[in-house]
Amino acid sequence: MRPPRSVFRHGLALGTALAILVLSQPAFAEAPQFPQDTQVCVRAAAQSDADPATLKDCALRSTRACQAREPFVSCAEREMEFWRGLLDQTLASFLGAAAQDHDRPHLADALSRSQKAWEIYVEAHCHAVERAMLGGSGAAPEELSCQLNHIVARIIALQGLD
Amino acid sequence: MCAIRAIALSAAALMAGHAVMADIIPLPPDTPLCAAPVLQDVDASAALRDCALLSTRACEAENGFVICASLETAYWESVMASEVTAHLRAHAAYDARLPGLQGVGSAVMDAQAAWQAYAEAQCDLVMAINSPGSGEMPSGAYCLLHMTVDRIIELREMP
């Protein structure tokens, strides 16, 4: 089997794109903002040649620091906004490259279908996790952690397609 | 029919006992032998990843990758079905006390259906990236096998 071809045939590798996106975020250009610990970790991961899976270690870093002062749920919701932004930008970068790939015109559609299916799956799975907490006080935190970890895993999966 | 669904259906057909194919190409026991002790330990689920592709590699000595990976995926699908059933059984009594509310079992079933659709769409994407060419079908079979193992681990790590 020949090695998989890069989605980014036209010059921009996804890892590079992620590094550019992360480094260009306002939090790095101006005063650090929440979630600083997570952002610093992501920046280090993007700059190194490390396995993309190391990004997983960055999940919930700022939330852990924050929850000494605030409830877990509010900390995690704020950190999740950062990860959602990173996922959106990663997808936009992928779609932009796919749109220029005239050899594989169905690539962008395939990504869109996959992304929509992923969103439905994560919502359903994390809801099941919440239900499995049987109404306990940990239900909402578990659901949020589930969603946040899946967003990070999705970014890693998209990087793995490179 | 999308290609990844064809791979999934061929795996399901093999698992369902289509005797001719299964008799001709039995699944080498490497993966089930590796997985059996891991499945007995609820805290070691991630180690299932180390068992992935062992039977496929043994099978590949005489057969193509796609059919070997499909055979092994059928094994993993049976494990996945057992894990879903375990959740339904574990929460049946609790769910029966929740009239009018969605129970755990129903939520797990919904999630499983959503996962199935996601796995098909994701592996279609992987195949699209590897198309056109000889890597298209192998990449889809590889994707489906690994996603199934990851889903098993996810189900086992649920509360």
Image (cartoon, helix red, strand yellow):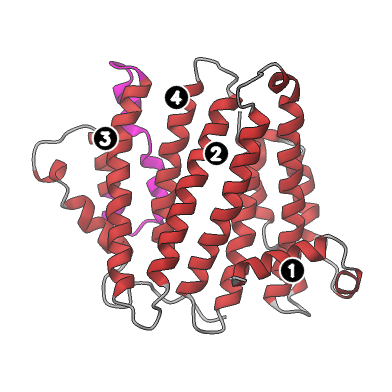
| Residue that appears at 76% across and 66% down | B71
Indicate which label's residue lies in the foreground, 4 or 1: 1
Magenta residues, start to end: A44-71
- Asked if marks 1 and 2 touch (Cβ < 8 Å), the reply is no
Q: Secondary structure at mark 1?
A: helix
Question: What mark, if any, has residue A141 been given in the picture?
Answer: 4
* Quarter occupied by the N terminus of chain B: bottom right
Q: Position of residue A31 (x, y in %)?
A: 9, 36
| x and y percentages locating residue A59 in the rendered image | 38, 38
Please give left or right for residue B50 compared with residue A94 in the image.
right
Residue picked out by circle 1: B10
Q: Which mark is residue A37?
A: 3
Q: Is residue B21 left or right of residue B86?
A: right
- Disc 2 versus disc 3: nearer the observer: 2
Q: Secondary structure at mark 4?
A: helix
Q: Residue at x 48, y 73 (%)?
A: B128
Which three-letter amino acid code belongs to the residue tagged 3? Answer: Asp
Majority secondary structure in the magenta region = helix
Task: Give coordinates of residue A16: x percent, y percent.
Answer: 27, 63
To the question of a shared chain for discs 1 and 2, the answer is no
Q: CA distance from mark 4 to mark 2?
A: 14 Å
Viewer-proximal residue, A2 or A77? A77
Q: Nearer the viewer, mark 4 or mark 2?
A: 2
- Does dot 3 land on a helix, a strand or a loop? helix
Any mark on residue A74, and which?
Answer: none
- Earlier along the polypeptide chain: callout 4 or callout 2? 2
Q: Which residue is mark 2?
A: A125
- Image quarter for residue B110? top right
* Label 2, residues with CA under 10 Å away: few <14, some 14-19, many ≥20: many
Are marks 4 and 3 in one subunit? yes
